[in-house]
Amino acid sequence: MLTNKHFRFRTGAPPLFSDEELLSLTMPVLFLAGENDAFLNTPKTVKRLQKLVPNLTVNLMKDDGHAAINMAPNVIPFLKTDIAVNEAVITS
């Protein structure tokens, strides 16, 4: 398969942000995840993020797993919130 020839699949654990890095986030953060994710311990991740990320919004998809497909209806309202708009940096 052509994709396999030119793409390196991740084989190890995903990179993790340190507690200090998460605490330093000042922008609004949206965490989207499926409750049935086979690769990520979603409840543990949500608990950690809620403890460390000040401006966190969590959106869990009840019947979804790891693949996040057609998430625009979940992302666009977050991007349109006052807090997200006020934090945005526009560059030309």
Image (cartoon, rainbow, N blue to C red):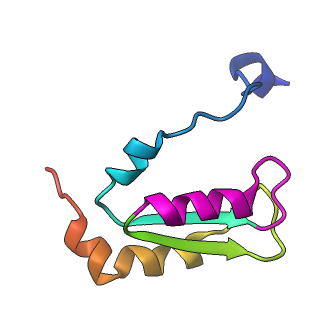
Quadrant in which residue 90 is drawn: bottom left
Inspect the magenta stretch and tell me whether residue 25 lies in it: no
Vertical comparison of 42 with 39: above or below = below
Q: Position of residue 24 (x, y in %)?
A: 31, 50
Residue at x 77%, y 55% (from the top left corner): 66
Q: Position of residue 73 (x, y in %)?
A: 57, 78
Q: Is residue 6 left or right of residue 32?
A: right
Quadrant in which residue 4 is drawn: top right
Q: Position of residue 79 (x, y in %)?
A: 39, 73
Query: Given the current orientation, which residue lies at the most extreme top position?
Result: 5
Q: Is residue 74 left or right of residue 36?
A: left
The number of discs equals 0
Q: Evaluate whether residue 68 shows in this view.
A: no
Q: Evaluate whether residue 81 shows in this view.
A: yes
Q: Nearest the camera: 2 or 22?
A: 22
Residue at x 16%, y 51% (from the top left corner): 91
Q: Is residue 74 left or right of residue 25?
A: right
Numbered range of the magenta stretch: 35-53
Vertical comparison of 78 with 30: above or below = below
Quadrant in which residue 61 is drawn: bottom right
Vertical comparison of 41 with 8: above or below = below
Q: Point out the image quarter for the N terminus.
A: top right
Inspect the magenta stretch and tell me whether residue 44 lies in it: yes
Q: Nearest the camera: 20 or 7?
A: 20
Q: Nearest the camera: 52 or 62?
A: 52
Residue at x 67%, y 68% (from the top left corner): 70
Q: Position of residue 81 (x, y in %)?
A: 35, 82
Q: Is residue 33 left or right of residue 84?
A: right
Residue at x 70%, y 58% (from the top left corner): 44
Query: Given the current orientation, which residue lies at the most extreme left position?
Result: 92
